């Protein structure tokens, strides 16, 4: 019995969140005293597949197929389930990414497995139990879920587990999987990138701004700070509703839920619906002119001040550090 980890790629390349999920799955395999097999679907080169050993994969299965180059939910779920059966894997781990969130329940149905969707820590295994901590209510709470099923699926929230380097030399094998015609009933025809900027769900650093910025013409300093830090930009809901920023930047209960290492919130009040999507960030810095703004209650660092004075000063300080 091995642990199976599904390794997601973007245009044939693995992302940091993939290495996190392999590191996590390796630790789960260690907890259970078993080995770790990784499964890659899409066209990924041998060197990238071998790199998975650096994070703990002892065996790498791949399905390289032009038809599967882009994510196809039904077909991918079927292949992961087939690989889990072939490997006799009782635990399947994947990222709680956009595609992982779509895949996990489908795999669970195919394997008649229990699913913990959005895990943030390693399982607790005391007393023959298998309990996983996960986020609940859009990140406002945590739940400890006991999985009692024979096969267990865990999807891991990006940025919730550190990448751990190891030194495995994995065997790399082609996996022959069958797919049915109706697995391809929904397919991605074309991918249009909104911009070349860092993608928000994957970003480790995020600079976010709200209605306190007064208007779209003032986002220059937010962009500048984000560029200097190598951060993604985000915004509150009213800002995207007003068309000041694209909807793809809206974070919160009704937007994207993120958990970066650093979230800088500028001119955002900290309404509960906003916090629902950002409160699992590792470090939160709040800049707001109102000392009573609710965001300060969840901030690790707070600056009470006018964003139009504070942000340029931070930009200057970061520039000096970079010189
Ligand atoms: P405001 O509440 O107007 O706050 C602006 C802040 O900027 C204030 O704290 C003010 O003190 C500060 N400020 C003003 N000027 C300056 C300055 N010069 N320098 C520094 N600070 C300044 N919201 C989301 O963000 N995401 C969601 O997903 C979301 N989902 C929702 C779902 C539902 C069902 C509902 C009802 C609401 C939802 N909302 C969501 C809206 C949410 O309730 C708030 O209205 C919203 O988050 C407020 O946005 P804001 O903080 O940018 O604006």
Image (tube, rainbow, N blue to C red):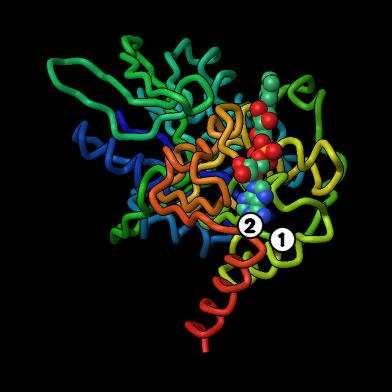
Q: Quadrant of ligand 1?
A: top right
- Locate residue 248, reporting x and y percent: 75, 43
Residue found at x 28% / y 28%: 123
Q: Position of residue 228 (x, y in %)?
A: 60, 73
Q: Quadrant of the N terminus?
A: top left
Q: Residue 303: give x, y in percent of width and height.
A: 48, 57
Mark 1 or 2: in front is 2
Q: Position of residue 182 (x, y in %)?
A: 78, 19
Residue 232 circle label: 2
Please name whichever residue, 24 or 171, is drawn nearer the observer in this view of the structure: 24
Residue tagged 1: 197
- Secondary element type, mark 2: strand
Residue positioned 16% across, 15% down in the render: 128
Is residue 17 left or right of 58 when viewed as pictured? right
Name the residue nearer the viewer: 161 or 140: 140
Q: Secondary structure at mark 1?
A: loop
């Amino acid at each position: 019995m091995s642990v199976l980890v599904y390794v997601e790629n973007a245009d044939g390349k693995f992302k940091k969140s993939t290495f996190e999920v392999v590191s996590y799955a390796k630790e789960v395999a260690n907890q259970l005293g078993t080995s770790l097999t990784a499964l890659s679907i899409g066209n990924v080169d041998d060197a990238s597949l071998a790199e998975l050993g650096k994070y703990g994969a002892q065996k790498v299965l791949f399905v390289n197929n032009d038809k599967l180059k882009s994510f196809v939910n039904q077909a991918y779920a079927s292949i992961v389930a087939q690989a889990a059966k072939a490997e006799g894997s009782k635990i399947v781990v994947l990222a709680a990414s956009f595609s992982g969130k779509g895949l996990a329940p489908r795999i669970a149905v195919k394997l008649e497995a229990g699913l913990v969707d959005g895990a943030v820590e390693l399982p607790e295994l005391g007393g023959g139990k298998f309990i996983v901590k996960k986020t609940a209510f859009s990140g406002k709470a945590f739940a400890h879920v006991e999985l009692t099923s024979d096969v267990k699926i865990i999807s891991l929230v990006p940025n919730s587990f550190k990448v751990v380097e190891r030194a495995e030399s994995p065997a790399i094998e082609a996996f022959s999987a069958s797919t049915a015609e109706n697995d391809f009933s929904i397919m991605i025809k074309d991918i249009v990138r909104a911009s070349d900027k860092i993608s928000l769900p994957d970003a480790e650093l995020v600079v976010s701004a709200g209605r306190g910025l007064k208007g779209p013409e003032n986002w220059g300093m937010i962009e500048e700070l984000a560029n200097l830090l190598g951060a993604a930009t985000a915004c509150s809901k009213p800002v995207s509703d007003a068309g000041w920023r694209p909807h793809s930047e809206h974070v919160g209960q009704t937007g994207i839920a993120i958990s970066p290492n650093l979230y800088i919130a500028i001119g955002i009040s900290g309404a509960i619906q906003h916090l629902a999507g950002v409160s699992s960030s590792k470090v939160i810095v709040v800049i707001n002119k109102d000392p009573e703004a609710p965001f300060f209650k969840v901030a690790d660092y707070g600056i009470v001040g006018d964003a139009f004075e504070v942000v340029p000063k931070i930009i200057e300080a970061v520039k000096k550090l970079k010189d």
